[in-house]
Amino acid sequence: MDEPETIDDPPSEAPTVLERPALVSPPSAPSATDTRGSGAASIVRSPADAVRADEMARSRALALVGVAGGIATALTSPLFSGGLAAQTLLVVGAALLGATNAYLYWVASEPARFTERRLMAIWVLATLGILCIVGVFGPLSGAVAALVLGVYVSARNASRRVARATYLTTAITHAPMALAPLFVDLSGFVVIGAELSPAVLVLAEGLLQLVLFGTYAAATSSQRTMLSILGELEGAIRQIARREVQLDEARQALARHAPVGAEGRLSGLRLGSYELGVLIGRGGMGEVYEGAPVEGAGPPAAVKVLLPEALQSEHSVLRFLREARAASGVDSPHIVRVLETGEPPADHPYIAMERLHGVDLASHLRRLDGLMPREEVTELVRQIGRGLAATGAAGIVHRDIKPQNLFRASAPGGPPTWKILDFGVSKLAGGSGTLTHGRLLGTPSYMAPEQAQLEDVDGRADLYGLGAVAYRCLVGWPPFSSGDVAKTVYRVVHRMPPRPSAHTELPREVDLVLAIALAKRPEDRFGDADGLSTALAAALEGRIDAEHARRAHALLRALPWSR
């Protein structure tokens, strides 16, 4: 039995139109937590990201307390009677505490500065500063509470190495300090604990070490539990986001395809070499009929016909003519084949195309629950890449590569073939640009930045679209998506999408290949479709060319993945 039959987008599916003024000033800063429309996908964050945001806020609050404590200690140091050595140690500790916490506040104010190396230095130095102060107040004084607090806060850190270093620095350094009075007379230097009996000192230090370890263990356990819960929540959010994308694509499909299999207003009419049969697709500007050859044996066709009201629109007619001329000018098994055309001033302008059986990529992804197997993505990119190479050789830029315009055509006894559909907004070599002058035509979620800025485009814009489609197949949603077209276009031009491997199980090499494929400048992308398909196939196996890795890292340093 044939799979459900679908055809390329009818002319009714005019791509989004946005006038240039919308790009003059950016919309109010697009939020990474925008939940309108299919943009809900953008709220998906990894557990590490959520913990990181919480840690940064907590670190800033703690830093303010630490700076205040350092200043207060330094100002009150002259009040202690431990002599010059004790006062000097107190001032050194206060300076370390205040300086490291001021630095912590600066580091925690910007995600790019909040690195493990900096946090390691901050926590170790701050702990040493507190230990200096504890050395004067006494290892069993109330100042020890600051050490316990430091161990707890650092153990809630997403970095286990920082937490372990802080705990070990505290525990190992405090023990000899607390037990020093057993061997050295510190009366007159240490305020509290210098005259306690050895048994009390040992017992007190043992209890404190137990408290420190218990604090460290409890905090790290709490962090692991939180990460586990966030991981489950993240999975649920991803699933919801993918379902929303699928639902949005399903709505578009329903809008394109009215009741299939019923007779239409032109059923039974002969157009050129074909008699129109049942309606197999319908939209606001056109209908698609099954066409049977009238004379002689020949393959059935899918006949696209403009509606009468669409004939009154110059834009609709121009788009229709563009599709007919562009598709008929390319000979490739990966391009829908045009069999015959009837152009205005005919009463019923039409395009007769090869009859395809199968599903478009959007429908196929819905069947797969939003994600495509890696080997199938590799084959999709390879075959569509060949189709784009053919259109490029013919001087054509498609300008609307998206899942709805990529068709998985089934063949009896053979593997499916991927084909490119709908050349209605394509750019022809030597064309005047009348169709798109002053307007943005295409699908923003898959649109190249130069196309979004109404600049002249070449085949690299289609390669960007193919990279965006690969991102959609591997991650579960488009690189950029929002209920607001202007916001989507702004992000396409100025931002990178979220890192692919942060949201699904993918080799990090895929991140690097897609960073090149989705580069903002055409010259930074792959030069041809073969380069993209070969690099992506290798990346999905965990391999990448050294030059590609270098290029990708340079691009991501200049414009990192969004969070």
Image: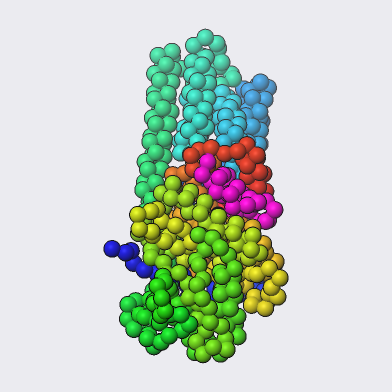
Instruction: Tell me where residue 280 sits by quadrant.
Output: bottom left
Q: Position of residue 19 (x, y in %)?
A: 64, 76
Q: Residue at image x 43%, y 28%?
A: 212
Q: Residue at image x 47%, y 50%?
A: 379
* Colouring used for the render: rainbow
Q: Could you tell me if residue 531 is visible in this image?
A: yes
Q: Which residues are the magenta region?
A: 511-538
Q: Position of residue 230 (x, y in %)?
A: 40, 47
Q: Is residue 367 magenta?
A: no
Number of numbered markers: 0
Q: Position of residue 400 (x, y in %)?
A: 56, 66
Q: Residue at image x 32%, y 77%?
A: 261
For the stretch drawn in magenta, the main secondary structure is helix
Q: Residue at image x 46%, y 54%?
A: 473
* In the rendered image, the vertical position of residue 3 relative to residue 119, given as above or below: below
Q: Position of residue 338 (x, y in %)?
A: 51, 71
Q: Nearer the viewer, residue 392 or 299?
A: 299
In the image, is 349 to the left or to the right of 259?
A: right
